[in-house]
Image (spheres, rainbow, N blue to C red):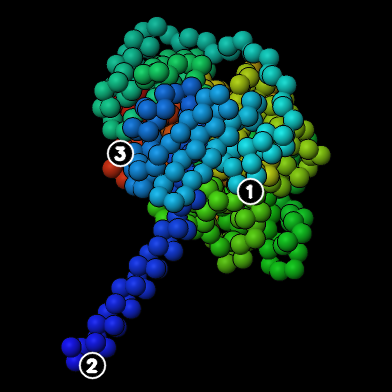
Amino acid sequence: MSAKAKRILYGVLAVVLAAVIGGCLYLNSLMPIITGYAAKNLASAVFVSGREAADVEALDLHFSFIQYTRNTVDYENRTVTSRFLWAKSTAVFREGWGVTLLRGKTVEQLKADRFPLPPAERIAERLQTGDSALRARLDPIARAVVDDHAYNGTAFAFVVLHKGAVVAEHYGKGITAETPLLSWSMGKSFVNALAGIMARDSLVDIHAPMDIPEWQADGRKDITLNDLLQMQGGLEWNEDYGNRSDVNLMLHREQDMGRFALLKPLERKPGTHWYYSSGSTNIVMRYLRGRFPSDTAFLSYIRERLFMPLGIWNACFEPDMSGTPVGSSYLYVTARDFARFGEMYLEDGCVEGERILPEGWVEYTSTPASDSQGCYGAFFWLNRGHTFPDVPEDMFSCQGHDGQEIIIIPSKDLVAVFLGYSPKPGRVMDFNGVIRDVLAEL
């Protein structure tokens, strides 16, 4: 072989080697996301929702690299360990706290790190059954949504309230009215409610600059809770779920998710640019947590001031390793609980005549953020831009990553809840079509 040919060969081998090394380094950076996603979501589905592990692996975890993880469920210690190639992650269930993805501590250290919450007293069911004739007309739609997948996607639960009463309700295999199910980003709307309650209690001022020490030396010192609630904080953020993005790193690698997000640099002037950011919600939750002396005191406040008035007794708002509930993503309550939450917003922040949210809070929530093109209020989505073309414009909603929805339509006195697994892009449920068909029967 000539010297020139050897140089070419060595050059090609060097490029190939560099590509292999680069690929391995990138793959290694994905390992916390791959194994962390599998461990966290499988553990919550099994130990919080009571689902069968095999069903979760076959549906919820059957995509991308996640489907190739090897998962071990330890029912005695209530942990899940997920392995992929050379990496592994473990998620731990603790009574009252739910599941936390283990980062930087042992299982024993994490379990010793939090005092157990006292068990919540079961609350009597508050929802009434609606008109039997209307229920009969809507039942085929409910069964089509859940049993027949007629509107695409996979629904575990479907509930419709009309004038405050249940007029449609159906559940999939292994799911009942008692099953707590994952909110994904619908949890953001519960953070909206919590911020409103704390504002009513004079614990926060949503229009004042936030006293976050890390922000005081630059333009971030001007960011308000209102800016974050409207997704207009101006911080650098990448919400792409398909790669090594900020949201994936935050949820699957970080011990303190809110701190990870608040350390991002300022990219735009606060209040001027809309960009959807799960990091913003976790900054808000961390900030609200800071108004209390302990994690237990904070969770007790959430239970007593938000969940109990709604009749929600078994809520599980799962925390990160720092102890702060992951407001962006990890709330577990039942389908009826989600419906009651929507009903509170339909009733201008009141529950059975008792005011829970401040006067004017629902109007504030459903007012478009200045740069959102009418699509977003304050941790709620809006239909001002006719995203749902066959649904009234006054609709506002809570939306989750895998097709979870609470749809609130004041003009129709209607709340609809969808829970399940309807991921983008090809399996998204036709929510517009379902609501269109429900409205046609009213």
The residue under label 2 is 3
One can see residue 218 in this view: yes
Q: Mark 1 falls on what kind of element?
A: loop
Which is more foreground, mark 2 or mark 1?
2
**Amino acid found under the numbered disc labelled 2:** Ala
Q: Residues within 10 Å of mark 3 (few under 14, many from 20)?
A: some
Among numbered discs 3 and 1, the one appearing first in the sequence: 1
Q: CA distance from mark 3 to mark 2?
A: 56 Å
Q: Quadrant of residue 350?
A: top right
What's the amino acid at mark 1?
A: Gly
Q: Residue furthest right?
A: 293
Residue at screen point 59% across, 42% down: 102
Near-viewer residue (11 or 436): 11
Q: Looking at the picture, which amino acid does disc 3 mark?
A: Arg
Quickly name the residue at label 1.
104
Residue 76 pos. (x, y %): 56, 24
Q: Looking at this view, is 50 or 368 the one in front?
A: 50
Front in this rendered view, residue 197 or 156 = 156
Q: Secondary structure at mark 3?
A: loop
Residue pointed to by mark 3: 427
Q: Earlier in the sequence, mark 3 or mark 2?
A: 2
Camera-side mark, 3 or 2: 2
Answer with left or right where residue 155 lies relative to residue 343. Answer: left
Locate residue 188, reporting x and y percent.
56, 40
Q: Quadrant of residue 175?
A: top left
Quadrant in the picture for the N terminus: bottom left
Dot 2 lies on which element?
helix
Residue 324 shows in the view? no
Which residue is painted at 40% across and 52% down in the image? Answer: 242
